[in-house]
Amino acid sequence: MSGGGDGVRRRWLAGVGQHASLSPDTWVPGAWVLSIGGAEQSHVNLADPTDIFYEYLRRLANHLDLITEPGTPLDVLHLGAGALTLARYVEATRPGSGQLAVDSERELLGFVTENLPVSEPARLRLVIDDARDVLASQLLEERFDAIVLDVFAGADAPAHLREPSFHEELRAQLKPGGISLVNVGDDPPLAFVREQLRVMEAAYRQVTVAAPSDLFGGRFPGNFILMGTDAPWNDERMDALRALGPHPGSVLSGVGLDGFRKP
């Protein structure tokens, strides 16, 4: 690792052949930006972990807020760690939660935790491994209230994490009432997110898609949050999810997705 007079911290990631950097957010005291190869990947506010900067992460957090009563501990599996932004959010909003974060990049996870330590390391286990290999191992003896998959985007998605069988494996790790949350970044014509929607609708009783409203027209790139559950959310909970934003945004499910399934 190296650091400069500008406060930026850097490390070479041999696995991806690029530099990772952590830069202080000049506008938000206590916040940091994680970049890989010069592209921003994560934003985390150590001074206030409930402050989530990226819109797609805010939508993920909204789903977690509505699983159970506020403040109730959750068991959460994070497949893709980044700067552990969402794990820190769960720590702050649901004290006592048990969490497992998995990432295949050893150097990245070490770089993040050395420079931006988590507040409750005893309750957040970190594993260096492939997401699917962890599901297939004996490591996961417990079940989870939520599984968050945030490891790919569009055509760059690893094939073994796109298959129907992988989503069946995710579903098998959920507690009754649990949810799978998948962040899908895609470009027009949004073939990948539609593919993932079909796969998830074959695996779960209910699938919802949350995103900025203008993305559903298929003309712009962006991030979609897909939720799968076997305990369907009723109208009241869906309305609460929509109200949390960010706005303008839409949360669609069932027949509401008919116009989106096909371009």
Image (spheres, rainbow, N blue to C red):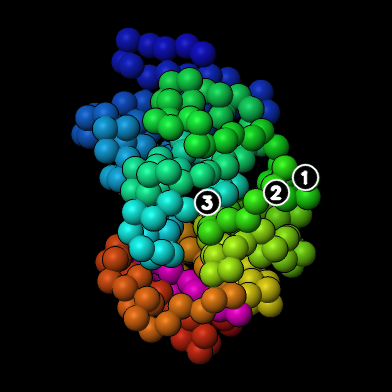
Mark 3 = which residue? 75
Based on the picture, tell me whether residue 216 belongs to the magenta stretch. Answer: yes
Mark 2 = which residue? 141
Q: Amino acid at mark 3?
A: Asp
For the record, the magenta segment spans 205-217
Residue 132 visible in the picture = no
Q: Is residue 104 above or below residue 178?
A: above
Q: Residues within 10 Å of mark 2 (few under 14, many from 20)?
A: few
Return the residue nearer the eye: 139 or 161: 139
x then y, percent, for residue 113: 49, 26
Q: Residue at x 41, y 64 (%)?
A: 68
Asked which secondary structure carries label 3, the reply is strand
The Cα atoms of the two marked residues, 3 and 1, are separated by 17 Å
Asked which secondary structure carries label 2, the reply is loop
Asked whether disc 2 touches disc 3, contact meaning CB atoms under 8 Å apart, the reply is: no
Mark 1 = which residue? 138
Q: Amino acid at mark 2?
A: Glu
Count the marks.
3
Quadrant in the picture for the C terminus: bottom right
